[in-house]
């Protein structure tokens, strides 16, 4: 069974710092990996999706990388801002079977605080 | 604007009472999902539907029921059989095209359910 781990559970950094969030998974046969942002009491907003054939995706100050062989993905945030404060979750999709919805596994997230 | 609408934002349940959470989407997505989120934990799948008039149990379906009579709507009923219903409930949708490695998940803003 796929397990997804995000360490640390919480992280505080000063404004302007570059930072890396980690996501590890146990089954390397993934189909894609998606990073989400969640603000308190809100739903999840998709940030980046990396297909299994890709190594990285970029959007603005965000860069997500994927290393399937080692079971790891990182989300790099450049020049962090207080508005980046939120919980960041990764989710891994395994397989494309008819029950594919059951194959999406979420990590428990990293709560990021960017201090002004 | 296209999106997913969940209502109500907050809901309170009395002992022995069934309550229904609403989820509507205008994204023309075939697939819809219900997730439960507990503090400090990842999302867990309750039910999902790949097409109208069809739905499947997720990992924690006991004590919940759903219907999918219309493509746009996927209501979730929390029954009295669910003994620990206090949680944040998230509805999501996706295009549902099987085999699309770039298929993204889109979320509503969530419903916080509490027991009185």
Image (tube, coloured by chain):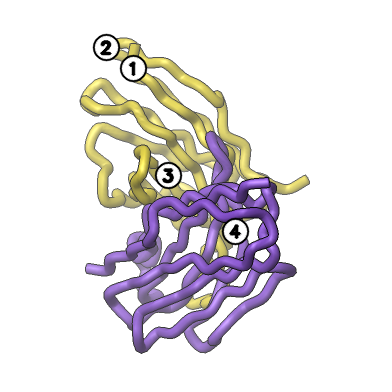
Which hue belongs to chain A?
Answer: purple
Which badge, 2 or 3, comes first in the chain's sequence?
Answer: 2
B93 lies left or right of A82: left
Residue at horizontal 46%, vertical 19%? B11
Q: Is residue B17 above or below residue A56?
A: above
Q: Which residue is mark 4?
A: A46
* Residue shown at 40% from the left, 77% from the top: A72
Using the image as rendered, state which of residue B61 and residue A44 is in the foreground: A44
Q: Chain of mark 2?
A: B
Please provide percent x and percent y for residue B108: 57, 42
Residue depicted at 43% across the width and 63% down the height:
A91
The correct choice, above or below, for B93 with respect to B73 in the image is below
Q: Quadrant of residue B79?
A: top left
Nearer to me, A26 or A115: A115
Q: Which residue is mark 2?
A: B15
Q: Mark 1 highlights which residue?
A: B115
Q: Colour of chain B?
A: yellow
Give B78 or B36, whichever is nearer the viewer: B36
Report how far apart the C-alphas of labels 4 and 1 lie in the structure: 30 Å
How many residues crowd around disc 1 within 10 Å: few (fewer than 14), some, or many (20 or more)? some
Q: Residue visible at 57% across and 74% down?
A: A64
Q: Callout 4: 10 Å neighbours few (<14), some, many (20+)?
A: some
Mark 2 vs mark 3: tell me if same chain.
yes
Q: Nearer the viewer, mark 1 or mark 2?
A: 1
Circle 1: element type: strand
- Residues marked 1 and 2 touching at CB (< 8 Å): yes
Contact, mark 4 vs mark 1 (Cβ under 8 Å): no
Q: Secondary structure at mark 4?
A: strand
Residue B71 position (above or below residue B18): below
Task: Report which residue position mark 3 lands on.
Answer: B34
* Residue B71, visible in the rendered structure: no
């Amino acid at each position: 069974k796929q397990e997804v781990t995000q360490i640390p559970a919480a992280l505080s950094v000063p404004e302007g710092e570059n930072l890396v969030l980690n996501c590890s998974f146990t089954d390397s046969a993934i189909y894609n990996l998606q990073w989400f942002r969640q603000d308190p009491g809100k739903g999840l907003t998709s940030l980046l999706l990396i297909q299994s054939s890709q190594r990285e995706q970029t959007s603005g100050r965000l860069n997500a990388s994927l290393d399937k062989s080692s079971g790891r993905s990182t989300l790099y945030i450049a020049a962090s801002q207080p508005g980046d404060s939120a919980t960041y979750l990764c989710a891994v999709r395994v397989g494309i079977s008819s029950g594919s919805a059951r194959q999406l596994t979420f990590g428990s997230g990293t709560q990021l605080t960017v201090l002004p | 604007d296209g999106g997913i609408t969940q209502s109500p934002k907050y809901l309170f349940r009395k002992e022995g009472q069934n309550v229904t959470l609403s989820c509507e989407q205008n994204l023309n997505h075939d697939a819809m999902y219900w997730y439960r989120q507990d503090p400090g934990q990842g999302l867990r799948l309750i039910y999902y539907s790949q097409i109208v008039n069809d739905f499947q149990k997720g990992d924690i379906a006991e004590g919940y029921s759903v219907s999918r009579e219309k493509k746009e709507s996927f209501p979730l009923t929390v029954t009295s059989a669910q003994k620990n219903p206090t949680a944040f409930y998230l509805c999501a949708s996706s295009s549902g095209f099987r085999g699309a490695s770039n298929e993204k998940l889109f979320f509503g803003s969530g419903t916080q359910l509490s027991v009185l």
